[in-house]
Amino acid sequence: MKCQIVISDEAKLDIREAKNYYAKLDIKLAKRYIVDISETIDLLSENPTHHQLRYKSIRIAFTNTFPYGIHYTLENKIVYIHRVFHTKRFFK
């Protein structure tokens, strides 16, 4: 049974910013990024407990091609996606 997916405004912004970055490099790259994110989210809806707990109730699903981690929680068959972080960037 598939779980419902709820994507936060912050996660939507993370996805949009990354897509825009890749679109500046190559539009095909941006499309591949969106496919990678979408496939990972689809897998989350089918099997959200596949990924181990990392921070209290936060789980992280990593995309296959691009270096991104989807941070989410699971509550009552609803997957809440909180953020989508690039795994190789450093923040100050």
Image (cartoon, rainbow, N blue to C red):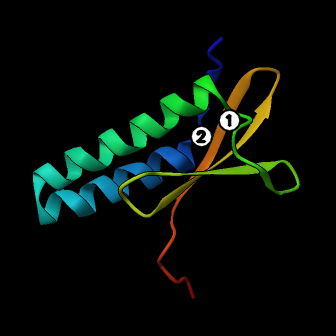
Density class for disc 2 (Cα within 10 Å; few <14, some 14-19, many ≥20) is some
Give the farthest residue toward the top.
Answer: 1
Mark 1 vs mark 2: give the one in front: 1
State the mark number for residue 8.
2
Looking at the image, do the residues carrying marks 1 and 2 touch, with CB atoms under 8 Å apart? Answer: yes
Q: Element type at marker 2?
A: loop
Which residue is nearer to you in this view: 66 or 73?
A: 66
Relative height, residue 43 to residue 67 (above, below): above
Q: Quadrant of the N terminus?
A: top right
Write the residue at 60% across / 23% down. Answer: 46
Q: Is residue 71 left or right of residue 49?
A: left
Secondary structure under the numbered disc 1 in the rendered image: strand
Q: Which residue is mark 1?
A: 80
Q: Residue at x 18, y 55 (%)?
A: 29
Task: Classify 78 as above or below 92.
Answer: above
Q: Earlier in the sequence, mark 1 or mark 2?
A: 2
